[in-house]
Image (cartoon, helix red, strand yellow):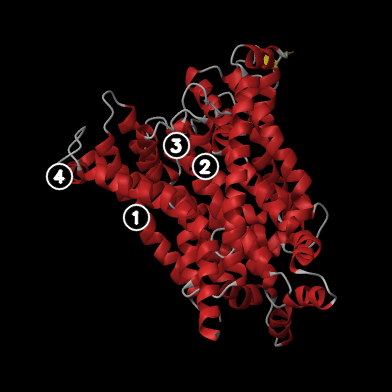
Amino acid sequence: MKRSSGVRSGLVTLLMLLPGLAGFFGLFFYPMMVTLVRSLRPEGEQAGWTLGHYSTFLGEARAQGVIVLTFVLSISATICSILFSVPLSLVLRRKMRGHGFFRLAMLIPRVVPGLIGALGLLLLFGSRGWVNLALLRFIPFVTEPVSINYTIPGLVLFYTWLYFPFTAVTTLSTLEALDPALEEAAAVSGANRWQVLRHVIIPLIMPGILAGSVLTFMAAFGAFSIPLVAGGNYRPLSVEIYRQINLTPARWSAASARAMIMAGLQVAYLTIYMRILRRPST
Amino acid sequence: MTVLRQYLQALWRARKSLVYVFLLCFSLLIYMPFLMILLKSVGRGWFGRLWLPPELTTHWYRFAVEVTNIPEISKNTLIIAGLAVIMSTLIGIPTGWAFGRRKIPGKELLMSMILLPRMIPPIAYGLGVAQIFYRTHLINTHFGVALAHVAVCAPYAILVLSTTFEGLDERVLEASAVCGANPWRTFLHVIVPLILPGILSSMIFTFTTSYNEFTLTLMTYGKDTVTLPVRTYIALGEGYWEVTSAMSILLVIPSLLVLFLIQRQVAPEKLVGGFKGV
């Protein structure tokens, strides 16, 4: 009796899980498998197997350039996000005037489509944008508009704008969960504010910073809409994938091979992220 | 490391005065791009080294509405987002319930798996989705595009609703039963009011996600299912920056409005989260 009711309850659980699992397998796993199979087929054929798409892509010097570019962009954006988010969260931690406003500002890049962000940033940093006008006006030795759009530093800036919220929100929420008693204890023991920050707060929020920056890194690595419209001649992996299916004739197998490489790298980062989350916080 | 140290040190010492300068720069950096889009969308003849457009006009908005058929495209976007919300909620309620209330072996791993589509770039499985949809003739149907969106929306609904169900207090349900309510009445008068806020916030989040989704739409749309983000992208490619700006403003106003309206109720920080809702 007991046992059969256990089986029944297990069945009910499974039944309830079914829609979620169906969604996962139907809309993610199966498409991934289709992509995998496609990447192993000769271009445009439905039969036969080849590793040619991987070897030609990974063998090309240009392809290595693409992967390096994707890494450089996402690593730089991650570092910029950390340098920006840690002071920002330390500042936003205290309740002050306009607190809610600033907190909300932090989320804005994540609730508008990346495309719109890219358009606004292109307008702002363009050769006739306000940033350049201000530079020309107020910085004496700037006589020509500085080109920011369609350059690597510009792209890093755009990426940072779009993806820093992952780091900032995670850091801020870790910071808010800190027990104020710890800081007080350190202060009572004679640590000055810098020492409290350096030896108590930063080590304690490190897991949060790390988790957030891995999220930023992964999002930046997979960034599509920003480099698509603001990348100019710089094409990271995602845009490279899209370009393959926009060629005539479309090269679906080549695109799939690139997509599989990208997915593989992402799963590797995800493993790192899970490790960071699992690690017991001190 | 020393650079970082000096940077933090300097910031710490002068923080009283620097804090507001820093926050001001930060807000300017966040809001200014939108101001530029707004100015671009209402300005005419804004060339050269001018800070503001010399002439204001509504021409670009009229152009966007009449020529690029924004009403039709908005209708597509809303139908698709609505369908995606319905499907994701129907998936999210039972699965979220199972995650929130049931013992499942390897629950954490299973949840990570369910959330995988949010972590892998959509372009990677979008390729597969497009190929499957071409075969099954789902390309260029509202249902098809919405179904593609469900791939990223459903994990959200499941995550939000599982925390909602987890928060349900067993004792309240028992109390209801003790007071003589049958299971149906308990469900209708106790459970539903308790989980309704969770369902609503899940619906808002999935709606926003679908409304803004670009990559998966790009892989599955056709001429009858152009959505606002895709149309904006096309307009950007055509090079009409003023019209693109007007469209962007029309596109972005609803999502900003929603953000400002819901911020008190539903902790929009969740929009940014990855696993575990952080």
Report the residue at 55% width, 26% height from top. Answer: B232
**Badge 2 local density, few (<14 within 10 Å), some, or many (20+)?**
many
The reply to the same-chain question for discs 4 and 2 is: no
Residue B160 is situated, as x and y percent measured from the top left of the image, at 63, 58
The reply to the same-chain question for discs 1 and 2 is: no
Residue A149 is situated, as x and y percent measured from the top left of the image, at 49, 32
Taking the image as drawn, is residue A140 in sight? no
Q: Which residue is more in the foreground, B185 or A71? A: B185
Marks 1 and 2 sit apart, C-alpha to C-alpha, by: 23 Å
The reply to the same-chain question for discs 1 and 3 is: yes
Kindly check if marks 1 and 2 are in contact, taking CB atoms under 8 A apart as contact.
no
Residue sitting farthest toward the bottom? A189
Residue A216 is situated, as x and y percent measured from the top left of the image, at 50, 54
Marks 4 and 2 sit apart, C-alpha to C-alpha, by: 32 Å
When the figure is inspected, residue A118 is found, relative to residue A272, above or below; the finding is above
The amino acid type found where label 3 is placed reads Pro
Q: Left of A111 or right of it: where is A29? A: left
Q: Comparing marks 2 and 3, which lies closer to the viewer?
A: 2
Q: Earlier in the sequence, mark 3 or mark 4?
A: 4
**Badge 1 local density, few (<14 within 10 Å), some, or many (20+)?**
some
Residue sitting farthest toward the front? A1
Q: Chain of mark 3?
A: A
Residue of label 3: A227
Please tell me the numbered disc located at residue A50: 4
Q: Secondary structure at mark 2?
A: helix
The amino acid type found where label 4 is placed reads Thr
Taking the image as drawn, is residue B33 in sight? yes
Marks 1 and 4 sit apart, C-alpha to C-alpha, by: 21 Å
Residue of label 2: B149
